[in-house]
Image: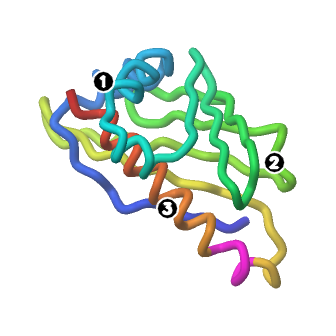
């Protein structure tokens, strides 16, 4: 199993508040729709439903992640059925006090060791982009 993790992003919201927001992704679709065109173009084609995230990229195509695990206040785990290889994406929320938290995204994927040099950089980019997206949507 290979793991690709974004850099932690500090946001000015409590971990509980972030967990509540990300537990129902329809909250995020409104935030996403309110981003500027430039911000939206950097994120790419992302859509939210109450418990899923659909991402469309030229490199991979369409992947839809569904929530498979919720651990209050610090972890949401997403799985996918449409991925060519077993993959999980995690949103990790670390409390940093009453009004601050840190968000990190992580992708765990089962790929053969010989393919990691080819696929790894793209998966690291995906983890970084997802981390940026979540941090951006975490701000009020």
Q: Nearer the viewer, mark 2 or mark 3?
A: 2
Residue extent of the magenta highlight: 116-120
Q: Nearer the viewer, mark 3 or mark 1?
A: 3
Q: Nearer the viewer, residue 121 or 93?
A: 121
Q: Which mark is residue 27?
A: none
Residue at figure coordinates x 57%, y 40% from the top left: 45
Tell me: 52 left or right of 80: left
Residue 1 magenta-drawn? no
Q: Nearer the viewer, residue 91 or 30?
A: 30
Marks 2 and 1, how far apart in space? 30 Å
* Residue 6 percent across, percent down from the top left: 43, 60
Residue at mark 2: 83
Q: Secondary structure at mark 1?
A: helix
Marks 2 and 3, how far apart in space? 18 Å
* Residue 129 percent across, percent down from the top left: 46, 54
Q: Main secondary structure of the magenta part?
A: helix
Q: Which mark is residue 5?
A: 3
Q: Residues within 10 Å of mark 3 (few under 14, many from 20)?
A: many
Residue 119 magenta-drawn? yes
Residue at mark 1: 16
Q: Secondary structure at mark 3?
A: strand
Residue at figure coordinates x 71%, y 35% from the top left: 64
Residue at figure coordinates x 31%, y 41% from the top left: 136
């Amino acid at each position: 199993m290979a793991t690709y993790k974004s850099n932690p992003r500090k946001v000015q919201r409590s971990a509980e508040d972030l967990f509540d927001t990300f537990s129902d992704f329809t909250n995020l679709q409104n935030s996403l729709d309110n981003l500027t065109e430039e911000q939206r173009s950097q994120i790419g084609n992302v859509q939210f439903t109450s418990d899923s995230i659909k991402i469309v990229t030229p490199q991979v195509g369409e992947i839809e992640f569904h929530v498979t695990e919720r651990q209050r206040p610090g972890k949401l785990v997403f799985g996918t059925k449409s991925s060519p290889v077993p993959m999980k994406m995690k949103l990790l929320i670390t409390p940093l006090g009453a009004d601050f938290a840190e968000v990190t995204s992580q992708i765990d994927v089962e790929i053969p060791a010989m393919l990691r040099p080819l696929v790894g950089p793209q998966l690291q980019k995906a983890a970084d982009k997802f981390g940026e997206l979540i941090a951006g949507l975490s701000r009020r």
